[in-house]
Amino acid sequence: MSWLSAPKMIVLGLGVTAVLKLTVGLVPMAATAETSASNAPLSLDIDPTLAAEPYDVTAPGANGMCEPSHVIAEAIAEERALLNDQRQAVADSEARLALAQESLKAEQVRLAKVRDEIGVQLQVIQDANAQDMTKLVELYRNMKPQVAAGIMDEIDAETAVQVISAMPERDAAQIMGAVSLVRARLITKIILERSKLPADRNLEGLRLR
């Protein structure tokens, strides 16, 4: 025998059916309410005591130090003055450099002028010396070899070497053959050594005067 009778089973089936109908009716309502809640605008309650305060330029910074506007202005003015001083120093240096360059150019022009004048004077002296040597050589060539050799023995060795060197070889040989042996050896030694470099010349023991 079943523990549920036919009347109890009929009542239980009616109850289940009623519950299912109630559930089907409540589900759409819940979905509609949820959608309405999600589409509703978000409302925030702001405390009026938390309104933004105006920014104070004189307020302390991160380091806790207060920098008023006049302090900043003084710092800017000091920086500008320092830059102006530096620019003035650079300008003064450039002016001194330009003046030094002008002085150097003027000195170079003066030295070039002096060099040209000295060159002209040296050329005049060399020309006069060449003319004098030419006359002296002609004078000794017109002498008799014995007379010219006697003079060569008495004058200084440097002058004798210059005159003998400027003469034609034939005239110089006649005079060299008539001078003393000591003077001939001296003149020969000097002529050989003067063609060498100054450091290589060996004039020790020679009496030039």
Image (tube, helix red, strand yellow):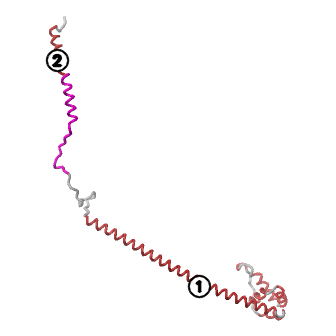
Residue 51 at x, y percent in the picture: 19, 50
Classed neighbour count for the residue bearing mark 1: other residues with Cα under 10 Å, few (<14), some (14–19), many (≥20): few
Q: Count numbered badges in the picture.
A: 2
Q: Is residue 1 left or right of residue 184?
A: left
SS type, badge 1: helix
Residue 127 at x, y percent in the picture: 70, 88
The circle on residue 18 is 2
Q: Is residue 180 left or right of residue 77?
A: right
- Name the residue rendered at 19%, 27% in the picture: 29
Which quadrant holds residue 77? bottom left
Which quadrant holds residue 141? bottom right
Q: Is residue 47 magenta?
A: yes
Q: Is residue 135 left or right of residue 102?
A: right
Residue placed most toward the observer, 184 or 77: 77
Q: Which quadrant would the N terminus be assigned to in this image?
A: top left
SS type, badge 2: helix
Q: Are marks 2 and 1 in contact (CB under 8 Å)?
A: no
Which quadrant holds residue 93? bottom left
Where 122 sits versus 24, above or below?
A: below
Where 25 sits versus 139, above or below?
A: above
Q: Main secondary structure of the magenta part?
A: helix
Where 40 sits versus 133, above or below?
A: above
Residue 199 at x, y percent in the picture: 70, 78
Magenta stretch, residue numbers: 24-51
- Name the residue rendered at 80%, 89% in the picture: 183
Classed neighbour count for the residue bearing mark 2: other residues with Cα under 10 Å, few (<14), some (14–19), many (≥20): few
Amino acid at pointer 2:
Ala
Q: Is residue 69 magenta?
A: no
